[in-house]
Amino acid sequence: MNQDRDHNIVVPDRNSQSHTCKESCPVEEKTETDGGSGHARYIGSGVHEDPYIVVWDEEDPENPYNWSKTRKWIITMQLALTTFTVSFSSSSYSGGLEYIVRDLNVSDELAVLGISLYVLGFAVGPLLFAPMGEMYGRRIVFLITVGLYTPLHIGGAFARNIITVLIACGILSHTSGTALTNAGGAVADIFNPRERGLASAIYAAVPFLGPVIGPIVGGFVADSSLGWHFNFWLMLLLGAISLIMGYFLAPETYAPVLLRRRAKHLMQLSNGTISYKSKYDIGRSTSFMKVMRVNLSRPFVFMFTEPIVLLFAIYISVVYGTLYALFSAFPIVFETRRGWSAGVGGLAFLGVGAGISVGTATASIQNTIYQKAMDKSSTGRAPPEARLHMAMMGGILVPIGLFWFAWTADPPVHWIVPIIAGFPFGQGVCQILQSSTAYLMDAYEIYFASAIAATIVLRSIFAAVFPVIAPTMFENLGDAWGMSIFAFLGLACTPIPFLFWKHGKAIRSKSKYAYKESESDDTS
C-alpha cells in the first residue's frame, strides 16, 4: 500500500482493479500515447455523483515538490526579484523628498504622504489577489498585476504636481501587492518543509532589503542631473524585467490549480463521459460569488480567529512600520541635524542593510536546527515551532538597536555611532520576518497566502502611518524619546516568538486551518 502523506489517502497496489470503493482505490494513471481518450484509475466511480478523485502519483513529475532543484531555484530567484522590485520602489521615492518639496512647492508632510499611499496599497492588493491566486493560480494573477503595475510608473515620471505623484503612488501599490503574497505562497508550493528554510529566508529578507537600498539609490539619482523623476523610470525598468522574467521562468505552482487542470484534461480526453475531480475540490462550492466571498474574507478570518496570525501580524507590523518610520526619521537626523545631502543621507541606511544581510545569512543556522528537529521527529517532519529560534534572537536585537540609535542620534555623538546602531535592528528585523514567514508556511501550508495576506494588511497600515507620525514625534518629543517610542513597541512584542515556541502546538491543535501533528512530535 502507498500513502499520500499530505492528505492521508490510502492507495492500494497496482493489481487492484476495483473502482466501486469510495475510500481506497488505485491511483494509477494510464494515458494512451496515440492521443486517445486517456484514462486514470483513482478513488471513486467516475460518475458525476462519485467522480474519480485526482491526486498526485508517488513520483509525479508535475508535482512542484518533485521538480528539479535547479528549476526551483530559478523560480525562487525570479520571485525574489519581483518582491525586491516592489519593496525597492516603495522607498526609492523617499530619496528625492527634498527635491519634491522644492520643485512642487509642498510641505514635508505632504511629500511623505507618497510613501504612505504606496505602502497602504499593499494592504488592499493582497485582500483581492491572494485569494484570487488560490482560486485561479498564482501565475495568471502575477502576470496581470505586474503587467498593470509596470506602465503605471509613467504617471509619476511625468508628474508636474503633487496630486499626480500621490495618485501614481496610490495606484501603483494596489497592483504590486501580489508580489508580497503570491510569491511567498509559490515558495511554499515548490519546496517541502525540509528544503524551504533558505528559500523562505530569502523571500522574507527581500521586503526589508529593498526598502533599505531604495533610499540610497533614490537619493543619488535625485542629487544627479537625472532628477527625482528618473526614480520612476528606474522603477518601471525593474518592473519590466520582473514581468519578462516571470513570463518565461515562472510556471503555475499551486497544487489545487494544477490538479484541477489535470481533472479537466482527463474529462476532456473521455469526451465528458468520465467524471474527475481534484482532491482539493471535494466538497468545495463551485459558485463564483460564494468562493470569492469565502476567499476574500479568509485573511480577516485568520486575523481574528487565529492567534498565531494575529500576534505575528502585530509583531511584523511593528518592526516593518518602524523600518518605514526611518525613511522620515533619517532625513531629520542626518540631513537636517547634520547637514548631509540626500544622496549621502541615504548611505545612513547601510548599517541597517548590513544587519539585514547578516540576518539572512543566519538562516543556515536556523535550517540546521530545523533539520535536527526533523531527525528527532517520529514522523520525519519537524513541528513548525522549530522555525522560531532566530525570531527569538531577533526579538532581543530590535529594541537594542532602536534604543542605541535613539540616544546617540544627534551631535555631538559621532555620526558612525547611530549608523552602527542600525546593524542589530536590521539583523533583528530580518530574523523576525524570516522565522515568522517560515513558521506561517509550515503552520498553514496551502492557506499560507491568506495567512500572510493578513499580516501584510496590518503591516502595510503601520508602514503607512509610522512615517507620517514620526516627524511630529521627533519635533514634540525630541529625537531620543521619539525613537524610543518605537523601541518600547518592539520590546513589548519580544515575548511573542517565545510564547509560540512553548505553546504553539497546543494553540494549533485548536485551529481549523493549522497543521496538526501527533503527540509524539517534539518541539525542542
Image (spheres, grey):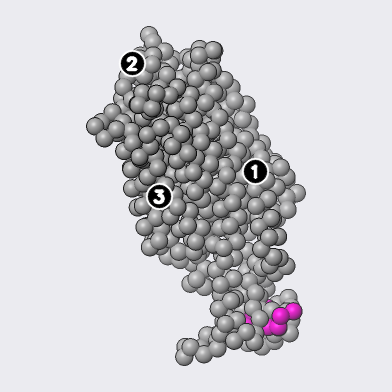
Left or right position of 512 against 113: right
Label 2 or label 1, whichever lies nearer to me, is 2
Q: Nearer the viewer, residue 284 or 377?
A: 284
Left or right position of 315 against 165: right
Does residue 49 show up?
Answer: yes
Q: Pointer 2: residues within 10 angstroms few (<14), some, or many (20+)?
A: few
Q: CA distance from mark 2 to mark 1?
A: 43 Å
What residue is drawn where x is 52% and y is 90%?
36
Q: Earlier in the sequence, mark 2 or mark 1?
A: 1
Q: Amino acid at mark 2?
A: Gly
Q: Position of residue 126 (x, y in %)?
A: 56, 48
Q: Position of residue 301 (x, y in %)?
A: 70, 47
Q: CA distance from mark 3 to mark 1?
A: 31 Å
Q: Are the two marked residues, 2 and 1, in contact with CB atoms closer than 8 angstroms?
A: no
Label 3 or label 2, whichever lies nearer to me, is 3
Q: Pointer 3: residues within 10 angstroms few (<14), some, or many (20+)?
A: many
Q: Nearer the viewer, residue 202 or 304?
A: 304
The span shown in magenta is 41-49
Q: CA distance from mark 3 to mark 2?
A: 35 Å
Left or right position of 411 against 276: left
Q: Which residue is mark 3?
A: 150
Q: Secondary structure at mark 1?
A: helix
What residue is drawn where x is 55% and y is 88%?
37
Q: Which residue is mark 2?
A: 339
In magenta stretch: residue 415: no
Residue most toward the left?
225
Q: Position of residue 388 (x, y in %)?
A: 57, 41
